[in-house]
Amino acid sequence: MPLNKKKKQLLNDFANQSDKLFDLGIIRTDSFTGEIGEYVASEVFKFRKTDRVTRAVDGIDTKGKTYQVKAKVIESDKVNYGIGNLDIESIDYLVIVYFTPNYETKRIIQIKSTQLPKGKVGISNKFLNSITYNSIDGSEVKLPASKQKEIKKFGELYCLLQSEEIIRSRRIVGDLGEYYASQELNLTLNENKNEKGVDAYDKKGIKYEIKTRRVYESGRRTGKSRRLNNLVGKDSKYLVVVALDRSFRCAGMWLIPMANVHNPKSAHLQIVNTTPGTKRIVKSRISWLN
């Protein structure tokens, strides 16, 4: 069903709070869990966060030690976390920050890269019992009170979005794009998380992949270089591109034949303007997207 007035206001409140975290230097992108995790880790281990383009290294401390940070929201004491593409040769430490659902720090684990396998690691109690690592309880983590207050408020709004069934996970941008696309195209969302690249089906069983980007002019959105990555080797017949505005409302939607996508490994968002066979589903409110 369409978003009612209450839900639209909740999304607007969430947008305002995310902007506040951005202004405080806590987040830099819409990858909220990862960004807050990096901020908390930088406060605990006193490192400087690197530029966003530095994929393997998230921080460097005053001694030159390098850190990669992962973050996860958990509702129990389980530490299970599968981490892929781990470049242990580029880092000295892997740090994992575990949060409660409202982004209070529950636990932090710090592991030397020499204790880690190359490529992929499955964090579990069994794995941790086999290595030497540093564990910090959330009660020991001290953040500036003003910033802790704003993070908590942000987390409470996130939980409200889930309880109001506006989003299904911690992927608010992706979840909303899937919601809007399913409403406009009468699609059934795919509940099989193991079926990669297939987000929804229509009544004929045709598969769709849905990509969503939040696009608006601000200090966080300074260019037109947004991309749609990893469209290679997918089973979906159609790609649905959804644009969201600052308040997470649909600002444009396009249906594109997947076979016609140029450079599917890293396609420019402006493929909605140039790809043959593209059908506009929702009129764009973004000047550079037709």
Image (cartoon, helix red, strand yellow):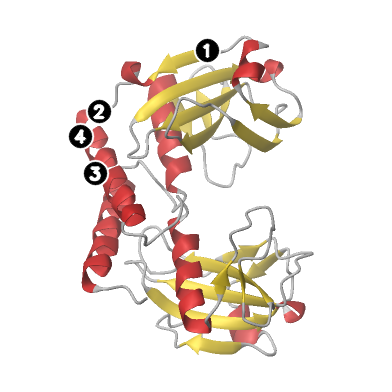
Residue at the image point whose x is 46% and y is 52% from the top? 169
Q: Do the residues labelled 2 and 4 touch (CB within 8 Å)?
A: yes
Q: Height in image: 160 above or below 3?
A: above
Under tag 4, what secondary structure? Answer: helix
Horizontal placement of 143 versus 47: left or right? left
Instruction: Indicate the position of residue 175 as horizontal and vertical percent values.
Output: 47, 61
Q: Earlier in the sequence, mark 1 or mark 3?
A: 1
Instruction: Indicate the position of residue 213 as horizontal and vertical percent values.
Output: 50, 66
Q: Do the residues labelled 1 and 3 touch (CB within 8 Å)?
A: no
Residue at the image point whose x is 68% and y is 53% from the top? 194
Q: Distance between the residues labelled 3 and 4?
A: 11 Å
Report the disc number at residue 153.
3
Asked whether residue 289 is in view, the answer is: no
* Residue at numbered disc 1: 134
Amino acid residing under circle 4: Ser
* Residue at numbered disc 2: 144
Q: Earlier in the sequence, mark 1 or mark 2?
A: 1
Residue at the top extreme, as displayed? 132
Q: Distance between the residues labelled 1 and 4?
A: 27 Å
Residue at the image point whose x is 28% and y is 50% from the top? 157
Q: Which of marks 1 and 4 is nearer the N terminus?
A: 1
Instruction: Indicate the position of residue 162 as horizontal and vertical percent values.
Output: 36, 54
* Residue at numbered disc 4: 146
Q: Are marks 1 and 4 in contact (CB under 8 Å)?
A: no
Horizontal placement of 133 versus 262: left or right? left
Near mark 4 (Cα within 10 A), the count class, few <14, some 14-19 or many ≥20, is few
Q: Height in image: 192 above or below 125?
A: below
Q: Earlier in the sequence, mark 2 or mark 3?
A: 2
Under tag 2, what secondary structure? Answer: loop
Choose mark 3 or mark 4, whichever is in front: 3
Under tag 1, what secondary structure? Answer: strand
